Amino acid sequence: MPAKNKAVFLDRDGVLNQEMGDYVRRFEDFHVLDNFEALKTLQDKGYMLLVATNQGGLAKGWYTEDELAKMHSHLKQVYMERGVDIVDFFYCPHHPLFTGDCDCRKPKPGLLLQGISKYNIDPSLSYFIGDRERDVEAATAAGVKGILIDSDQPISTVLDLID
C-alpha cells in the first residue's frame, strides 16, 4: 500500500487573496496576498497545497465560471513564479438560497473530502487554514486539523502550529 500524502488546505478569500467583504466578483479586484515564503516552507516540508473555497457568487450570477477560472489561474501563476505549486482548487458553486443544500459548501467537509480522495491524503497529517469558523468546522468534519486566522493575516504567523 503506497504511503499517503499530507496536505495543507487553504481557504481562498482572506487567506490567499485579499478579503473583499463579500465575493470577489471581478478579476480586477483580485489581489494576491504575499504568503509566498510561508507556503514555500510548507511545500518544502512535504505538504501538498490545495485550495478549498465557497464560491456562492456563481449561483447568484455575480460572476462566471470563466471569471473564477481566470482568478485561480492567476493565483496559481503568481505562486508558481515564486516556486510554490498550488496543486488544485476545489470550490463549491452553490448557495443555499439559490441552489438548495449541497455536500460541498463549508462548513460541510465535501471540498476537503474530494481532495483527500483525489490525492490519497491522510487527514490526520493534514491541516486547513481558513479565516472563518466554518473552515475549522469543515476541517474537523473531514478529520483534518483546522487553523483559524484573521482575514488577510500572514500565514507565517501560524507556521509553528504545523508539524
Image (cartoon, rainbow, N blue to C red):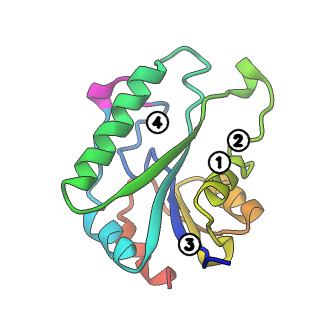
- The residue that disc 3 covers is 5
Q: Is residue 15 visible?
A: no
Q: From this viewpoint, which residue is outermost toward the top?
A: 61
- The residue that disc 1 covers is 111
Query: Do tag 2 and tag 3 residues touch (Cβ < 8 Å)?
Result: no
Q: Secondary structure at mark 4?
A: loop
Query: Label 3: how many residues lie within 10 Å, few (<14), some (14-19) or many (20+)?
Result: some
Q: Is residue 37 above or below residue 137?
A: below
Give the CA distance from mark 1 to mark 4.
22 Å
Q: Tell me where residue 148 appears, x and y as whole percent.
A: 56, 64
Identify residue type, mark 2: Cys
User: Is 71 left or right of 146, judged from the image as shown?
Assistant: left
Identify residue type, mark 3: Asn
Q: Is residue 145 above or below residue 30?
A: below
Magenta region: 24-29
Mark 4 or mark 2: which comes first in sequence?
4
Q: Secondary structure at mark 1?
A: helix
Comparing marks 1 and 4, which lies closer to the viewer?
Answer: 1
Which quadrant is home to the N terminus? bottom right
- The residue that disc 4 covers is 21
Looking at the rendered structure, which numbered label has been put on residue 104?
A: 2
Comparing marks 2 and 3, which lies closer to the viewer?
Answer: 3
